[in-house]
Amino acid sequence: MSPLRALLLLLPLVLLACEARETPPNTSPGHSRLSIVCTTGMITDVTTRIVGDEADVTGLCGPGVDPHTYKATRRDVELLRAADVVLYNGLGLEARMADVLVRLATDGKLVVPVTSELDEDFLLTPEEFEGHEDPHVWNDPAAWLSAIDVIVATLGEAAPAHTAAFARNADTLRSEIDDITDYARTCYASIPPDQRVLITSHDAFNYLGRAFDIDVLGVQGVTTESEAGLADIERLVELIVTRKIGAIFTENITTDHSIRALVEGCDARGWRVVIGGEVFSDAFGAPGTYEGTYVGMIDHNATLITRGLGGTAPAAGRNGKLSAE
């Protein structure tokens, strides 16, 4: 896809500013270490893995924080201004930080959307999202491999002396993502076809659904700022009862009100559906935990969803590291 398509729709100046930058940050001996600020946890984790000990990485949206509604604090703005590189998702995910990112880019800072190399044909455009692309691309690991390529190229521009180290670290990470993708594919394929329906609070899993052949439905739309109405609840209750779906799932960034409304609606229709657990959608687990990594996030979701919908997966996940539920 063209780089412009990958930028926040409210950020038309970011690309121009990035292209206009003529020199990378000064990483010569005696200069302070390269400083990188990332908007979401998914970007922060893979960037940290790629840079190793060669740079400092700071993330803005922590565990359980919704990037759709996140506004940069005064401290965030200070961090962003002091950074050599700013990495963000794009595709409208960080809409409430748009003005800050625009100002940084127009001042000449290296501000890069990690989704910039995704082809337009890859991106999904839900009908209710007014023609805008779905930003939740990390839920398809193949898309996140593309984001890693963008990060490696960006950091190589910012710190040319460390390009080889960044590439080696990225290769190790890609191998781990390939492995967890194979595990997820095997898990999801074990779910009985008539139960292969993932219902969550908002539409964050469309790319996962397409990648792993699962029907995906959210009570809310693509953004958590949309509102779920009675008609949405009734529509999903009808589907759950008709298809006899056994489990639905809450998300770590939203309340469980709409999911519990589905449970109550199904009870009223004589069908018992359970809450199968909490999936990670737009943010993942606590720092220092396995679930607080991108690979751990994919592992957690694949394992939890598979077991909840009647498939086969080990309780502790692919690597035996998942926390006890």
Image: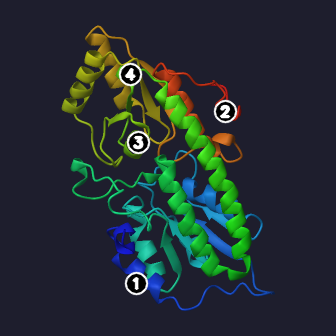
Q: What is the crowding at mark 4: few (fewer than 14 residues within 10 Å), some, or many (at least 20)?
A: many
Distance between the alpha carbons at the discs numbered 4 and 1: 47 Å
Which circle's residue, 3 or 1, is located before the other in the chain?
1
Distance between the alpha carbons at the discs numbered 4 and 3: 16 Å
Task: For mark 1, give the secondary structure.
Answer: helix
Distance between the alpha carbons at the discs numbered 1 and 2: 43 Å
**Quarter that holds the C terminus:** top right
Q: Is residue 144 above or below residue 105?
A: above
Which circle's residue, 4 or 1, is located before the other in the chain?
1
Instruction: Tell me which residue sits at (53%, 79%) in the image.
Output: 110
Query: In the shown orientation, is residue 228 left or right of residue 82?
Result: left
Task: For mark 2, give the secondary structure.
Answer: loop
Q: Amino acid at mark 2?
A: Leu
Which residue is denoted by mark 4 in the rendering?
195
Q: Amino acid at mark 1?
A: Leu
**Disc number for residue 16:** 1
Q: Amino acid at mark 4?
A: Gln
Which residue is denoted by mark 3 in the rendering?
205
Instruction: Tell me which residue sits at (56%, 59%) in the image.
Output: 43
| Residue 23: percent from left, percent from top | 59, 90
